[in-house]
Amino acid sequence: MFLLLLVFPSAFAQPLNDYILKEAYRYTSGRYVLSSTGCPEHLVYADDTILKKSASGTYCSGYTFTVFFNTMKEHHRFEGRSSDELRKIQKDWYGITRDATETQCLFVLEQQGWGRKIAFDEAQPGDFVQFWRNNQSGHSVIFLKWERDSTGHIIALTYRSSQLKTDGVGDRTEPIGTGPKDLNRNRIYLARLE
């Protein structure tokens, strides 16, 4: 008796968190500058430059997009995509398009079928995060861990990104709460690349 088994690529998709973290920690310096592409290196696909390296420094969206881009490229996940499609994906990741403004990285992963939304209790180091503070400022980051109080309640997020406080790429912890500079618990979007 023979059993025919059809295997669909998405059926056995594995999270790429370990690779994402490895890629994230390749970048250890640089200045924070909110201009240009924010990318720490040229992003090239099929001999076409999708984004040029920022000459003056990095910022959050450029840094996290670089980590995402290199992870996808290394795992051959862009095959069949045109350079124009990748440029559109970059605009969504940066929150430039109307549909992607709020959730950015989550929007890209869900829209393209590359990943899914993650609940707080499922979060793992290497997940992508778009969050907003109560003062309406936002940040694109890579999740490292939750900070908890003595009762186990999540009170802060530790992440890796490019920001002013670390003058470029570095790890940072920010509180989640009701203060104007605190993260808004209802506007923290976690996404896992699978």
Image (cartoon, rainbow, N blue to C red):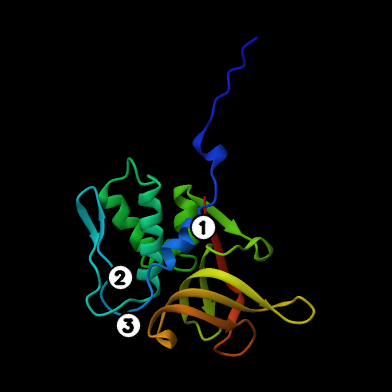
Mark 2 and mark 3 residues within 8 Å of each other at the beta carbon: no
Of 112 and 145, which appears nearest the observer?
A: 145
Q: Which amino acid does label 2 sit on?
A: Pro
Query: Earlier along the polypeptide chain: callout 1 or callout 3?
Result: 1
Q: What residue type is labelled 3?
A: Arg
Q: What element carries label 3?
A: loop
Compared with 166, 67 (above or below) is above
Answer with the quarter of the image where residue 182 lies.
bottom right
Of 126 and 174, which appears nearest the observer?
A: 126
- The residue tagged 1 is 18
- The residue tagged 2 is 40
- Residue 3, position in %: x, y? 62, 16
- Residue 110, position in %: x, y? 50, 53
Tell me the quadrant of the picture where the N terminus can be found: top right
Answer with the quarter of the image where residue 181 lies.
bottom right
Task: From the viewer's perspective, tell me whether residue 155 is left or right of residue 173.
Answer: right
- Residue 82, position in %: x, y? 27, 46
Cα distance between the residues tagged 1 and 3: 25 Å
Mark 1 and mark 3 residues within 8 Å of each other at the beta carbon: no
Task: From the viewer's perspective, tell me whether residue 84 is left or right of residue 144.
Answer: left
User: Residue drawn at (24%, 80%), measured in percent from left and top?
Assistant: 56
- Residue 75, position in %: x, y? 40, 47
Q: Which amino acid does label 1 sit on?
A: Asp
Of 11 and 99, which appears nearest the observer?
A: 11
For this orientation, the residue located farthest to the right is 151
Query: Earlier along the polypeptide chain: callout 1 or callout 2?
Result: 1
